[in-house]
Amino acid sequence: MLSKDSTLSALDRFATNLRRVRLESGLSQEKLAELAGVHRTYVSQAERRVVSISLDSIEKLAASLGVTEEELVGMSTPE
């Protein structure tokens, strides 16, 4: 049987994981954007699935959060 997360698109999984990891790290969107070298509105739009994020941005955000790209795009872990 498929888990709920397996039916989500990669963009949906990324947005969900980005927000979860950012909050777990205690970072604001503004601080994460600063660390990753992107604009705060870009982080906001990525979390809300407004933009299709580039691979370069995924790498920057993952590095800034101290996680792998796979952790941001892959299936979220159960809480």
Image (cartoon, rainbow, N blue to C red):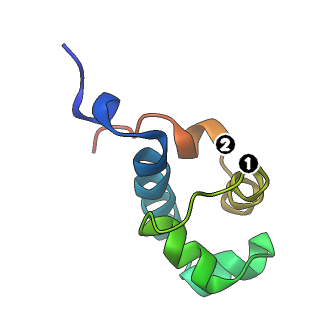
Q: Is residue 1 left or right of residue 57?
A: left
Q: What is the quadrant of the N terminus in the image? A: top left
The amino acid type found where label 1 is placed reads: Leu
Is residue 26 shown above or below 62? below
The quarter of the displayed image where residue 60 is located:
bottom right
The residue that label 1 is drawn on is 55
Q: For this view, does 14 lie left or right of residue 54?
A: left
Extreme residue in the top direction: 1
Question: How many residues crowd mark 2 within 10 Å: few (<14), some (14–19), many (20+)?
Answer: some
Residue 55 drawn at (x, y percent) = 73, 48
Regarding mark 2 in the picture, which secondary structure is present there?
Answer: helix
Name the residue that disc number 2 marks: 69
Residue 33 percent coordinates (x, y): 69, 78
* Of 28 and 73, the residue lying toward us: 73
Quick one: label 1 or label 2, which is nearer the N terminus?
A: 1
* Residue positioned most to the left: 1
Q: Is mark 1 on a helix, strand or loop?
A: helix
Residue found at x 56% / y 80%: 29
Q: CB of mark 1 within 8 Å of CB of mark 2?
A: yes
The CA span between labels 1 and 2 is 9 Å
What amino acid type is highlighted by mark number 2? Glu
Image quarter of the C terminus: top left
x%, y% of residue 9? 40, 40
Q: Is residue 49 visible?
A: yes
Residue 31 or residue 44, whichever sits in front: 44
